[in-house]
Image (tube, rainbow, N blue to C red):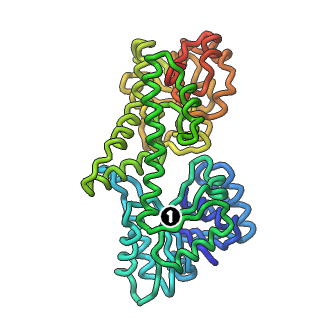
Amino acid sequence: MNILVIGTGYVGTTTALVFAELGWNVTGLDTDAQKIQQLEKGVLYFYEPGLEELLKKHLSSGQIRFTTNKEKAIQDHEIIFICVGTPSRPDGSADMRYVKQVAEDIGQTMNGYKLVITKSTVPVGTQEQVTLWIQAAQKGSYPFDVASNPEFLREGKALTDALNPDRVIIGSNSKKAANLLQTLYQSAKCPVVVTTPRTAELIKYASNAFLATKISYMNELARLCDQLGVNIKEVANGIGLDPRIGPSFLHAGIGYGGSCFPKDVSALILAAKQNNIELSILEKVVYVNQTQHLYLLEKARERLKSFANKKIAVLGLAFKPDTDDIREAPALRIIESLLKEQANVYVYDPVAKLPADLHYGSVTASNELEEAVKDADAVFLCTEWPIFRNVDWAKMKSIMNQPNMFDGRNVLDSREMNSNGYFYHGIGYE
């Protein structure tokens, strides 16, 4: 079977490359000609370990190709994945304009049976809406099915997750569509759950919201640990040994970010309100996440008295390691707060960069960690990149103005930092 993936962003490119790796012939379609040109040259325009190598491999093998010709692409493929963006609107709802445009393009262009699969994260009821959009745009009477197949990719681990999924969710009211999708995933060594489209759509939102809840719970608990003189890492280890809880997403820090959790939690809360249901736990999850960085800033403020005219180094911009994604990154909230208090901010991240359109004024982007730390009055560690664990912090102390370390990810060993002469504060009695 030949597969068309519409939208060559993070999810679309990963999806296309993984299906190519599984042996299917894949075409990636996008309206962004520059993006397509880069992919055709074997250049991945975002950072994700392992993907660029896979891109070059399958360009060479002929398993994958890219195009901007939507009419030909849609007509030449029976199986079509929708992988376009669904960004948040100001009210928290998902912006569905790109999904609608793709659905209309399919309806106007289709020349025979099509299986249209929504992989983008979308509100419950989208499968029904996509069906209506395609029907309204059709110029002929061609049969089609619309199914839901949400992705569960972790940025930084997308290739591993896609090749070794922990589950495959298929939402379809059509036995034919479900069977075709099961054929695509026939090599998957994991449970394949076939359910209704609405259930599949909600599973995606509910999964991310639950993980976000675990994070905010531990972050709020870490504040109590500080007051009680209890180490949050030991608490996390102790409760994570309970198989009903598990050890993942129990690491306290300065909050979650990225393109999924903030957007998906907000969309689920809004969907509940539109149906006269209050998700008060999730509302608190969002509140904790939005204020968690302020907790660490307050600890730093107590130590420094004032940030004004102080040099502050911020290490890590990406919301997590192994990605260059800075969307909703807690580091940005830290930087904004420091600038409001007239600090001189120097930032360093091994991969992620501050885009020019963010206009952070006096922020200095450092090419080397030492440049950011030199003469600093304090360091905020905001992303748990492995290289930060391996820094010779005893040496770094000698070039700092004041050896103050505020570890927003509990990356470093508090006892070692203290023995090296640092004032060290993590999240939750470090």
Q: Residue at x 39, y 67 (%)?
A: 126
The answer to whether 285 appears left or right of 408 in the picture is left
Q: Measuring from the top left, give residue 139's x and y in whole percent.
A: 39, 87
Q: Amino acid at mark 1?
A: Lys
Q: Nearer the viewer, residue 89 or 280?
A: 280
Q: Is residue 255 visible?
A: yes
User: Which residue of the protein is positioned furthest toward the bottom in this rendering?
Assistant: 141
Q: Measuring from the top left, give residue 346's x and y in whole percent.
A: 52, 27
Q: Residues within 10 Å of mark 1 (few under 14, many from 20)?
A: many
Q: Is residue 381 visible?
A: no
Q: Which residue is mark 1?
A: 119
Residue 220 sits in quarter? top left
Q: Is residue 152 above or below residue 186?
A: above
Q: Secondary structure at mark 1?
A: loop
Q: Is residue 74 above or below residue 392?
A: below
Q: Measuring from the top left, give residue 99's x and y in whole percent.
A: 42, 66
The answer to whether 12 appears left or right of 43 in the picture is left
Residue 387 sits in quarter? top right
Q: How many marks?
A: 1
Q: Measuring from the top left, give residue 334's x and y in whole percent.
A: 44, 30
Q: Residue at x 59, y 54 (%)?
A: 45
Which quarter of the figure is the C terminus placed in?
top right
Q: Residue at x 58, y 68 (%)?
A: 28
